[in-house]
Image (spheres, grey):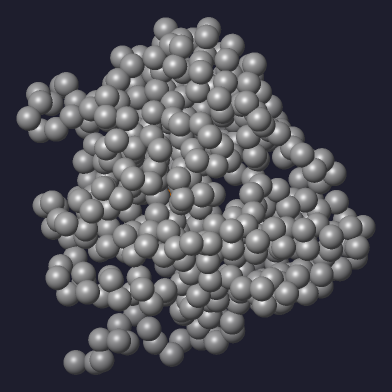
Amino acid sequence: MADARNIGQTSATEAELLDLAGNVLNGGALGFLMLPREADVVIREGRGSKLISVDGREYIDFLMGSGPMLVGHCHPRVIEAVEHQMRQGTTFYFLNEPAIRLAEQMIEAVPCAEEIRYVSTGSDATFLSLRAGRAFAGRSKILKFEGGWHGTNDYAMFGTVPQHASDYPHAESDSLGVPDVLGDEVLVAPFNDAEFAEQVIDQHAGELGAVIVEPLQRVLKPEPGFLQAVRDACTRHGIVLIFDEIVTGFRLAWGGAQEAYGVVPDLACYGKAMAGGYPLAVIAGRKEVMDAFGNVSRPPQSIAWASGTFNGNPIGSTAALAAMELLSAPGVYDQLHRIGSRLRSGIEEAGRRHGLPVQALGEDMVFGVRFMENSQPKTWVDLLENDKAMGSTFAVECVKRGILIVPNEKFYISIAHTDEDVDRTLEIIDEALKVVAAG
Ligand SMILES: Cc1ncc(COP(=O)(O)O)c(C=O)c1O
């Protein structure tokens, strides 16, 4: 038998693998990430802040798995913990100590968490937390904010990436295959408009079960008072407030956006960074609301069903515990701030040097480069001003020179990124912006 280490790894070149991917993968990609052929890559391995392609090119990675790799690729502590667990078993469906310990740890870390329920992906977490909210409140509608991304479940697809302002609180679905009738169940309001959100909540209180919000909505910071106003309106009417912390959890602060922005929801969805790079997600929240999920001792019609084969699997749980150990070390969040802030100001400065309206929007740990004059956009509609063509050219020129980013998306900073990475990145960005400026 051939060496098992060669399973799935051959001596094929990147060009050969890209051709094959085009033939065997739906859409030629793993999802929405697809670079133009001249910049496209097939990754062989990750090390800290770097990714290495099958052709041996090294990149500074600012995608970091689209967020999960907050502790960097292949951190030895995570590998050691996971290797040990792998030799004890992969998945059991039964209770296991890593899953119980992780729940204990989450409850200590996350302000709203009195109990947690495991799921496997962020989309599961948002979909099922909405179900719990509706079950708890006994009302079926939900409110979300325009431009918020809560994964690809049917409810999440309304008012997600519209090309103009929605007819609030009505919004179209941005995906084919989503039943039109759900459009009556999903209300949509502009992010950061506290007065409008309160109005919609007050007006629809009798039919609203849950409000879901990304506290840092993609690259838009919440305006002072916005999250608190939504919190207060939900409290007034017994509506369940859900923070989608899939991006912000353990990233903006140890206690996530709840800690960073000082507003505590009823439920929070966690995924990405919490699990050290493994597919595991969590719904955390107040006992009273979490009780909607119930357990098997209750009649099936009296619970909000939430079950999944891989929920609380020991490998993901172990990786999460190892990642949290690393993130709880003193100075971690200061370092993330420092590195991200150097990068953001360096990028904006480079934009000015080249006469380009470049904004590095968001928080230091996660931000997006946008080509627009408005340096303080507040809503999704404000972000439509971004010149996407410039964003694409910029990203492609960066990738060609050794920085991995996705056009018009986000930079994720990790604890593995160094000052040398920032220096090199800023040199490359300067060259990329020169190309953008030349048109
Ligand atoms: C804020 C937010 N919520 C939910 C999701 C969905 O998570 P997943 O891709 O794990 O289903 C994402 C994914 O990017 C996200 O950014």
Rendered residue at 38%/77% (across/down): 76
The quarter of the rendered structure image containing the N terminus is bottom left
Rendered residue at 46%/86% (across/down): 12
- Residue 408 location, x and y as percent? 67, 53
Q: Residue furthest front?
A: 330
- Compared to residue 325, the image places residue 287 above or below, namely above
Q: Quadrant of residue 62?
A: bottom right
Q: Quadrant of residue 407?
A: bottom right
- Residue 52 location, x and y as percent? 53, 80
In this rendering, would 372 be left or right of 90?
A: right
Which sits in the foreground, 388 or 90?
90
Rendered residue at 78%/74% (across/down): 427
Which sits in the foreground, 230 or 33?
230
- Residue 2 location, x and y as percent? 24, 92
- Residue 237 location, x and y as percent? 43, 11
Which sits in the foreground, 271 or 75?
75
In this rendering, would 423 be left or right of 242?
A: right
- Compared to residue 188, the image places residue 107 above or below, namely below
Q: Residue furthest left?
A: 297
Rendered residue at 19%/65% (across/down): 90
In this rendering, would 371 be left or right of 28?
A: right
In this rendering, would 247 be left or right of 431?
A: left
